Structure formats: structure tokens, C-alpha cells
Image (tube, grey):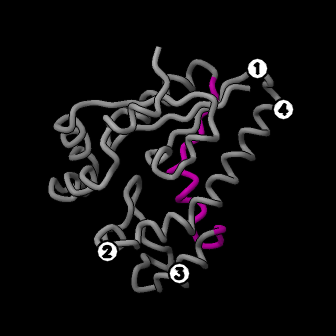
Amino acid sequence: MLKVGLTGGLASGKTFVGEVLASSGCLLIQADELGHEVLAPGGEAYDAVVREFGRRNSDGGRPHRPPTAPPRWCSARPGQLARLNALVHPSVVRREEESIAEFAAREPRGIAVVEAAILIETGSYKRFDRIILVWCAEEQQVERALRRDGAEENDVRARISRQMPLDEKRKFADSS
């Protein structure tokens, strides 16, 4: 079983590359999807996030976390995003590992790919045999991100500025 981490910056093309790999027979696990599941009411991280951040930051009883974006209330305050990640990531990683183990039992020579934006920043890259970095120019990231529902240019640029620069991520990626 080959375990591959797929990472990159905001709107860099990770999902597209992941879908291409999945269409070739790889197992694709999207960390963002798992994050939404563990943050849903009844999910493993839900109660801890509500205890930590309160319901004022929730949307209809669910801690606010729009698709593929950390919540604005969290990103704007130093340390809040790190705290949210500390509450959510253990459950996400456990689910990833369970999915990989199930796939390995069926396909011992298969390839499991975990798509995660902050794979390197969290140290999770160490769990993988190979790291694929998807990257593009920052202006292209902004252009792509602005096509998403509710995206605003100031927010997009702020998110990119808080991420590890892609040149730094390149140091961790496997090259051919």
C-alpha cells in the first residue's frame, strides 16, 4: 500500500489532481470533507468546538465552518485557528487512517491519497510515503478562489498570506 499526501495552497488545484488520481483507481480521501463531518452535530469534534468557542460562533447549531475555509471569526484572532485545528484534526486523522486500513485490506497494492491543504503545517506529511504538491501562481489562486460562492478578494488574499508559502512547501514534496 502506497500512502500519498496531496497538498497545496488555497485554490491551487488539489481537488482536480485528486479527482484525476481517483479516476485512475486510487482511493481519494478529502480531509476537508472529514473535517465537516466531525464538526457536524454528533460528530467527534462538535461538542469540544462548541465548548471552546461557544454557540455564538455557530450556524444553526453547527460550529460555523464554510466549505474549504476556516471560519472568519477564528482566522481573525491569533491562536484561534490553531486551537480549532487541535480539536478537529485528531478525529480527521483517525478517520483517514481507518479508511486507508480498509482500502489496504481490499487492495494491498493500492494507492491511497489524502488531499489536505495543511498537511505540511500540521506535521501530518510524515505519515505518508510520498508528498505531491500542487501549485500555481498566486494570482491564479486568487482568480480561482474568487469563483467560489461568497468569496471576497480581501479574504482570499488574507487566507493565502496566512498559509505556508508554496516555495516552502516545495521542500517537503517529492519530485520526479
Name the spot of residue 162 as percent of width and height, x first.
29, 55
Residue 90, placed above or below residue 111:
below
Marks 2/4: CA distance?
43 Å
Name the N-terminal-most of marks 1 and 3. Answer: 3
User: Disc 4 designates what residue?
Assistant: 105
User: Disc 3 designates what residue?
Assistant: 50
Magenta span of residues: 26-44
Q: Residue furthest right?
A: 105
Query: Residue at left 40%, top 80%?
Result: 57
Q: The disc labelled 2 sits on which kind of residue?
A: Arg
- Determine which quarter of the picture holds residue 103: top right
- Element type at mark 2: loop
- Determine which quarter of the picture holds residue 27: top right
Q: The disc labelled 3 sits on which kind of residue?
A: Val
Residue 93 among magenta residues? no
Q: Nearer the viewer, residue 83 or 38?
A: 83
User: Disc 1 designates what residue?
Assistant: 109
Question: In the visual, does 61 lie left or right of 105?
Answer: left
* Dot 1 crowding, Cα within 10 Å, few <14, some 14–19, many 20+: few
Q: Nearer the viewer, residue 49 or 59?
A: 49
Name the spot of residue 26 as percent of width and height, x first.
63, 25
